[in-house]
């Protein structure tokens, strides 16, 4: 039970006029309007000499309120955290407090005023200072309070907040007004612990309302998830502990809002808050949460792949007030998901495979070649990432025409500026799907990420540029997120775009291209009689050899002479090529109506020292048909598979009992693994920890053990990741049920 102290605001007593002028901020001439608005009773002098009413204590009834508000999982609401529990509630929904006085409250004699304050300089004009009297009736959709029950000196009060209430940490006070002989004494009780008021997706009047309870159990209440990575034909789930209920996370989220520079008038507006958060999660403009690093050199920080969750990142930022090093797109997305879920905005991390990065607003990816078929790197400023992870947040869009609410895309990874700041979204997915890119925010950039055409340009002998090939089905593949409450991938590609090649999809692309540029004439491409296909790779494990295969089909009747080359390079997941692995040239005749293959063998020794963090390779094929001047160039990306990590642990665990967990896998390489360590994380199972390990010899089976002791009942997830210099992010998870 929180303790405070009732004391006069000023020395002894003040007159009624001074009270209204100084305490409320109104001059005497406006007192009548104030009384009419706020319902304050100005009592005439009375002969009664009742003892002044004073607040002795206030209980926020945390154990009773938090289940009703879906906030029981917040660590700060529990006493087992070694500090006084704090109340977390959701706006637009009443909660009860219990007030104990020095004597029974008399509504005919005692004047009580409840006060809520937010920010450094709370003011009624900013609605950061709110006060109201007790009422006998419910006051839905607004600030108010009514007596729910009275028992002697104890009063149970039901407090209501509006569904557009500011998202903040509020201070709670009670003013007891005592008037005698033309003078008024104000005794103020200030509660030591704050009240956190969050978005309420369970409230029909809240901007983030969602009627699907299963969705809310996932997108607001689930602390664990999966973020998908890899390539479109080799998708790998990365376990992620969002940890939105962990100690200090909510405090950090409120801090971010406080330092955001957002005007208080939009502190209840989900659109404004999300747009600002996409800037605050990255560091370039405002010293936000995370520093991005795609160089491969992570000295002075932590490799992005080694993070297992958001909580340690947010906790470090909260303690140091300095950007945390380092993150890449899935880390930015995981942190934004955590912040949104903590604040009560339904959110999920979404992965787009073959994600276009359009730098010039043309709503296309332009790839340039010289007249000999070699890449013109100076002109190639657009890129295609193997995958890119952003967020979707659920909300209505009162700033847009009707029909554009629901899931909105938002991206905290600093790629391009918007309004001069590295932020992106929120953008309506309905607008994106239909190519309606004039609506805020950042529609053209997001549309290009999922539905741009890849346009190949060649320099002609006279120096002019011409289009020779358009790929209309290579961008925005297998857009993925986690299914609600299931450890499975959900493909949501059709929520972003119509099926490839349909009339609706082409119409959306053409509409979008007219918004982004006037070059819609480039979609007229001449016919050719040679068909090329770079064959997609089956699963290849790191340490194995593989073949790059180009299928060539002559669909005409005449023989054709073809020459070209095949190549393989290591690459970063952003599509940037790194080290050359192998290149072969070829030449051949292909008879009319016949098909053939060109192969290039890549051995482990070719790539063993050249792989980057995610073991990805970029395969390229270039060919030219001598007789027709037809040029073909394409690229294919694939990920070498990593070994599985195995855990041995019972599915059901006893509360407070210690268990040993065994971890094992087999090194697939002909080289030793060095600088090895385990990253282990499992909220309410054990504190996150890094366990250094000995080197793992070639082809050796690695085995290690650690202990954990469950501290909380219910289903919990354990995340384990093995890292080394040679192989990063060998991961696994296991869900366990903790029982008494």
Image (cartoon, rainbow, N blue to C red):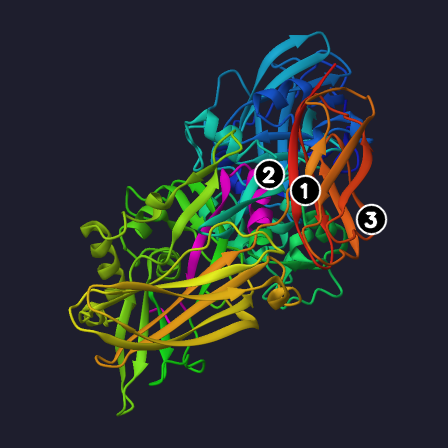
Q: Is residue 735 left or right of residue 319?
A: left
Q: Secondary structure at mark 2?
A: helix
Most extreme residue toward the bottom, as rendered?
Answer: 462
Picture residue at 60% right of the left edge, 48% below the top:
335
Q: At 44% across and 83% down in the image, what residue appears?
A: 378
Left or right of 296, for residue 396:
left
| 2 or 3: mark nearer the eye | 3
Nearest the viewer among 711 and 272 is 711
Over which residues does the magenta segment extend?
Answer: 333-362
Magenta-span inclusion, residue 341: yes
Say which residue label 1 marks: 249
Using the image, determine if residue 624 lies above or below residue 544: below
- Label ID, residue 693: 3
- Residue named by callout 2: 342
- Tell me the quarter of the image containing the N terminus: top right
Q: Position of residue 143 (x, y in %)?
A: 52, 30
Q: Is residue 555 left or right of residue 309?
A: left
**In the rendered view, would you say 611 is above or below 133?**
below
Disc 2/disc 3 C-alpha distance (Å): 35 Å
């Amino acid at each position: 039970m929180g303790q405070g102290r009732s004391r006069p605001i000023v020395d002894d007593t003040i007159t009624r006029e001074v009270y209204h002028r100084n305490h409320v901020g109104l001059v005497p001439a406006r007192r009548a309007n104030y009384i009419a608005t706020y319902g304050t009773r100005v009592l005439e002098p009375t002969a009664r000499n009742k003892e002044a009413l004073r607040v002795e204590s206030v209980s926020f009834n945390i154990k009773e309120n938090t289940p009703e508000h879906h906030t029981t999982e917040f660590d700060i609401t529990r006493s087992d955290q070694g500090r006084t529990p704090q109340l977390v509630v959701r706006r637009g929904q009443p909660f009860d407090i219990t007030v104990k006085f020095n004597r029974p409250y008399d509504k005919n004699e005692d004047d009580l005023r409840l006060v809520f304050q937010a920010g450094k300089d709370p003011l009624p004009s900013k609605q950061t200072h709110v006060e109201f009297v007790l009422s006998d009736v419910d006051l839905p959709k607004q600030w108010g309070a009514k007596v729910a029950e009275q028992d002697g000196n104890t009063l149970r009060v039901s407090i209501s907040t509006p569904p557009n209430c500011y998202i903040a940490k509020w201070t709670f006070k009670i003013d007891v007004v005592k008037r005698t002989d033309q003078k008024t004494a104000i005794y103020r009780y200030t509660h030591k612990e704050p009240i956190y008021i969050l978005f309420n997706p369970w409230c029909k009047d809240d901007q983030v309302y969602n009627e699907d309870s299963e969705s809310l159990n996932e997108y607001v209440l689930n602390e664990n998830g999966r973020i998908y990575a890899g390539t479109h034909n080799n998708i790998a789930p990365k376990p992620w502990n969002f940890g939105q209920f962990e100690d200090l996370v909510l405090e950090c989220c409120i801090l971010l809002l406080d330092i955001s520079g957002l005007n208080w008038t939009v502190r209840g507006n989900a659109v404004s808050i999300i747009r600002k958060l996409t800037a605050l999660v990255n560091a370039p403009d405002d010293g936000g949460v995370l520093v991005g690093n795609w160089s491969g050199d992570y000295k002075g920080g932590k490799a992005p792949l080694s993070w297992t969750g958001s909580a340690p990142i947010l906790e470090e930022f909260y303690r140091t007030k300095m950007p945390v090093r380092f993150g890449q797109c899935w880390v930015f997305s995981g942190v934004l998901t955590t912040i949104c879920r903590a604040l009560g905005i339904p959110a999920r991390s979404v992965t787009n495979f073959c994600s276009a990065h359009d730098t010039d607003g043309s709503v296309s990816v332009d790839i340039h070649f010289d007249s000999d078929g070699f890449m013109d790197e100076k002109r190639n400023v657009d890129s295609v990432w193997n995958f890119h992870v952003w967020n979707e947040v659920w909300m209505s869009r009162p700033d847009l025409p009707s029909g554009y609410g629901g899931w909105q895309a938002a991206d905290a990874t600093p790629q391009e500026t918007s309004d001069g700041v590295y932020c992106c979204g929120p953008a309506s997915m309905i607008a994106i799907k239909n190519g309606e890119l004039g609506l805020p925010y950042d529609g053209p950039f997001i549309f290009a990420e999922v539905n741009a055409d890849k346009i190949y340009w060649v320099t002609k002998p006279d120096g002019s540029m011409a289009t020779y090939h358009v790929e209309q089905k290579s961008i925005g593949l297998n857009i993925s997120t986690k299914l609600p409450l299931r450890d499975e991938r959900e493909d949501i590609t059709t929520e972003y775009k119509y099926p490839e090649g349909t009339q609706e999809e082409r119409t959306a692309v053409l509409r979008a291209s007219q918004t982004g540029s006037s070059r819609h004439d480039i979609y007229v491409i001449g016919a050719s009689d040679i068909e090329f296909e770079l064959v997609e790779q089956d699963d290849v494990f790191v340490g194995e050899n593989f073949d790059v295969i180009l299928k060539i089909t002559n669909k005409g009747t005449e023989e054709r002479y073809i020459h070209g080359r095949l190549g393989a390079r290591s690459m970063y997941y952003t599509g940037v090529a790194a080290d050359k692995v192998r290149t072969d040239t070829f030449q051949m005749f292909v008879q009319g109506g016949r098909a053939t293959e060109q192969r290039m063998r890549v051995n482990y020794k070719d790539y063993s020292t050249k792989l980057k963090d995610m073991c990805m390779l970029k395969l390229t094929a270039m060919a030219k048909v001598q007789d027709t001047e037809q040029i073909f160039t394409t690229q294919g990306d694939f990920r070498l598979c990593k070994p599985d990590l195995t855990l041995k642990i019972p599915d059901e665990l006893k509360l407070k009992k210690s268990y040993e967990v065994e971890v094992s896998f087999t090194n697939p390489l002909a080289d030793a693994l060095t600088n090895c360590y385990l990253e282990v994380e499992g909220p309410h199972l054990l504190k996150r920890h890094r366990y250094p390990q000995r080197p793992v010899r070639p082809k050796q089976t690695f085995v290690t053990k650690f202990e954990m002791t469950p501290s909380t009942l219910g289903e919990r997830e354990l995340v384990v990741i093995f890292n080394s210099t040679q192989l990063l992010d060998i991961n696994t998870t296991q869900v366990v049920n903790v029982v008494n």
